[in-house]
Amino acid sequence: MRYGLIAVAIALLAVLLLGPLVTSLIDDWSRRDVEMRASLAYNSVSVPLASMLTSGQDDHINQLFERVATADSRVVAVGVCKSDGEPSYATKLMPSAIKCAEISRSDVESFSTIVVGGRRMLIGAFPISADPSHGHFIIVQDLTFAEYRGQEARNYLTLMLGGIILASGALAVGLVLYLIRNWTQKFKQAVIGATVPGRASADPVTFGILDREVRQVLRQLEMSQSAIDRDQANWSKSTLRDIVMAELPGVEVLVVANREPYIHNRGEHGIELQTPASGLVSAVEPVMRACGGTWIAHGSGTADRETVDAHDRIAVPPGHPEYTLRRIWITEEEQDGYYYGLANEGLWPLCHIAFTRPVFRESDWRTYRAVNERFADAVVAEAKTTSPIVLVQDYHFGLLPRMVRERLPDATIITFWHIPWPNAETFGIFPWKEELIHGLLGSTIIGFHTQFHCNNFLETVDRFVESRIDREEESVTHKGHETFIRPYPISIDWPPAALENQKSIAECREVVRKRFGLPADTKIAIGIERFDYTKGVLDRIRAVDTLLDAHPEWRGRFVLVQAAAPTRSKLSTYQGLQDEALALADEINAKYGDVSPAPVRLIIRHHEPTEVFELFRAADVCIVSSLHDGMNLVAKEFIAARDDERGVLVLSHFAGASRELAEALIINPYDAHATGEALHNALTMSDTEQHERMHLMRAYVSSRNVYRWAGRMLLDASRLRKKQRIYEIAAADPALGAR
């Protein structure tokens, strides 16, 4: 009843508001009709009338006017005004109120309205000819008929409009009532499905025309407490474990990565354990320690097969197992095609702007696809539930998310792309771009280090794949599946495990100086990474040359210790880089051969994390000169190592970390002179300034550590899993259907 009264009120209001507009329109139309008739009447008599006036044919004029006046019942009178007095010629019904003085002023046709005996009349005045002596032809028409016609039209129009509005209102009310009832029932079902275990169904819930708004409200309701807890949390291993237990009780976590966190090799003293120098391992391994689960990776060690069980599994970390490592065996031929070929000769240079041409081979692509298929089979084999959380790591597995989605449709798949994503034009040269994008869009969430990389990915999808992109939600809907694109700046364990049992800063400096034979007053700059052309090792060494050229006072008082682990040595570009770095270091050392110590110390071997942190603690400066990098964890590890809040970080603008660590000295590594000047500024920076910069960076990295990185992804996964349950109809409860 209430909605019916509202509809009637709306209809009446519409009529009242539209009534004056309708009246005005009809009056204007009626007046134009009468004016047109007057113009037609004048046009029919203008020529003979002018002739008659010239020759003084009064009788003919009167006869002509009588014919005009009697031809149309709306015409009251016609006449001619030549002077300011009464009309010179006029039919007998000419109103006495008409005065020629008011009519004959205009040199063009004009119209005016008068009221005679309570009736509105329209007077049309037309100059008879160019000769002023002829005067004006006037025609008086009765507007009463127009008023009747206008009133009749208004009545019909009002009835019609009112009927339409009432009918529309009734239909709208009925639709609203239906939608509200349906929406309310579905909302109840969604909330029950989200909060009561076992009450959700497998059918997606939609909320009609309010679907988008309701979804947003539900997202806000779901995330409000989690967001507060997340922002206020002191992120640590225990915090992450508690959040996983609270938000994802009983969830199974599977990590898929090419690199394994622990490698077993045969050595001089039997089987030796090695932790690889990998930013991915440094970031993900602490998460697995906190969450448990299974890490699926390529078994690359020479003794890996000897250390697994019958199912190719081993509990890790050794001595304190907290999760399972499942090793996948890849032949050398497959390794050449999948890892060295497509991944590192193709995708790696494609995604890094380091001016190395990517190489694409059809055989590599086939092997890449086959290895992705094998890892997807392993995920299904290791999954103990139908809806695990699968964390897919890096560019080695671009096809795997879609493969897992087809086998485990209820899985929550989070793919983190650890390297940059190029712009759409650059990615367009990849021969299998559509298939790779389709593979990635099998993910629930795709994560990148920076928002810039997220934007590049969305633009790439927009250009090459038919899909629906929601810019507000930053999601892509492809073949009915929605994938969210999110920035997750990766970070490190805090405090890093490698800091345990470390010597003091002074002791570390003494050990390192003794190891390299450096005097006590020598300033030490540290560079640590894999031998990769994207890391800017050559540019860093050249910057040392420019420093010593521009500031000779540092000759014999400054040394760059460059620790570089060999990597991908089977590829000519990497082996060539190592040879070139050795030659460049020798050249610069020879150039300054008259001073001691030599300015560049190049150590090409793997360094364990404890060794790396010892170098960090001994250094005055850490140089990160990446030519292009997703994040670069070396910069954050250096900050974590400096609990004395001293030391200077020189950081490339082209590393993702530069977006977070603004207190570092930001450089363009392509500019050797500017980099050399930055080194000089770092070496001469006061202790006070070093403290202020390092204090801010340590506060940032400690609060935004690897647990926060993982926690944000897992909380988003939890949110999406809850959302999925909210969008399902709880058909299992018949009571809901009866309401």
Image: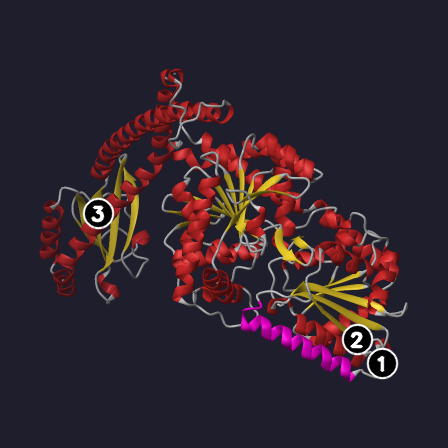
Q: Are marks 2 and 1 in contact (CB under 8 Å)?
A: yes
Q: Which mark is residue 599?
A: 2
Determine the residue located farthest toward the front in the rendered image: 269
Disc 3 and disc 1: Cα gap in Å?
107 Å
436 sits to left or right of 149: right
Q: Is residue 50 above or below residue 378?
A: below
Q: Residue at x 45, y 59 (%)?
A: 460
Query: Can you identify the residue that label 1 sits on?
Result: 595
Q: Nearer the viewer, mark 3 or mark 1?
A: 1
Query: Can you identify the residue that label 3 sits on?
Result: 33
Residue 274 in sight here: no
Label 1's element?
loop
Q: Which region shows up in magenta?
A: 569-591
Label 3's element?
helix
How far from the left and from the top, in percent, is residue 466? 36, 54
Q: Which mark is residue 230?
A: none
Q: Earlier in the sequence, mark 3 or mark 2?
A: 3
Disc 3 and disc 2: Cα gap in Å?
100 Å
563 sits to left or right of 692: left
Q: Earlier in the sequence, mark 3 or mark 1?
A: 3
